[in-house]
Image (spheres, rainbow, N blue to C red):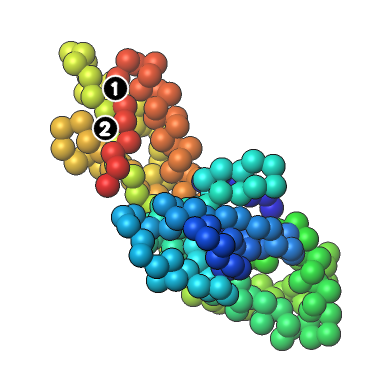
Amino acid sequence: MELEEGDVVLCTVDRIVGTNVFVRIPLNGNEVEGSIITSEIAPGRIRNLRDYVVPKKKIVCKILRISGDRIDLSLRRVTQKEQKAVMEEYKLERSYTNMIKTVLKEDANKVLEEITKTERLYDFLEEAKSDSSKLEKLVGKENAKKVLEIVTSQKKKNFIIKKEISLKTSKPDGLELIKKILSGFKDIEIKYLSSGHYSLKFESSDAKSADNQLKAAIVEIEKSAKKQSVDFSILEK
């Protein structure tokens, strides 16, 4: 697993130094450090940083920049939906960890360490639902079956990611051009809102997947709009 700009990640507040907050981010079985400047904690004037962050508290942040070993984060740019999605995944991962320990007993820690060297347990088990080969290689077919029976029985919430965009043109065939630009996205629900305004909605059991799918669709729409000389913009709510 690699961290990328734009990722929404779960962090643990480590320390507050002056106007900077330093956090720990789990990555491949270890932790890396990130920092948040005061203006990225919350909008408006902040009288006391500890109203928002205290050491050992878990917070959800967005990665703004990665420059070498430095990771700049934002707390204020995380939406409520993004925060809920990340915390939901965190709770599920804790549940998965306990389940692995119950099934594998004394072998659990070794297996968990092997999995988290390269990816999150949550992502590993989500992938195992459709392809159990890696799980079977680690724990054997019988144990893999037990693990997947429990994982698939867990009730999982679907995450909905929405964006609003604007597509406008003065061309006589503008409506047809816009229909063409918005066609071909079968997994994304597209709705007309008002003159030139459209909403895009994608639903998935994985928050990051939903976000990435919608971002990819918006990139394609923007490219297509540019080719057709149609004005494109993302509407911020």
Q: At label 1, which amino acid type do we have?
A: Asp
Rendered location of residue 85, percent (x, y)? 46, 63
- Dot 2: what SS? strand
Rendered location of residue 180, percent (x, y)? 33, 25
> How far separated are the C-alphas under marks 1 and 2?
8 Å
Q: Are marks 1 and 2 in contact (CB under 8 Å)?
A: yes
Where 103 falls versus 229 (above or below)?
below
Query: Which residue is the site of mark 1?
Result: 231
User: In the picture provided, is 163 more to the left or to the right than 122?
Assistant: left
Q: At label 2, which amino acid type do we have?
A: Ser
Rendered location of residue 31, percent (x, y)? 70, 62
For label 1, count other residues whose C-alpha is less than 10 Å away and answer few (under 14), some (14-19) or many (20+).
Answer: some
Q: Going 65% across and 47% down the picture, which residue do you hit? A: 70
- Decide which of 81, 194 is in the foreground and name it: 81
Q: Going 30% across and 20% down the picture, which residue do you hit? A: 230
Q: Going 47% across and 69% down the picture, which residue do you hit? A: 53
- Decide which of 108, 7 is in the foreground and name it: 7
Can residue 187 be seen here? The reply is: yes
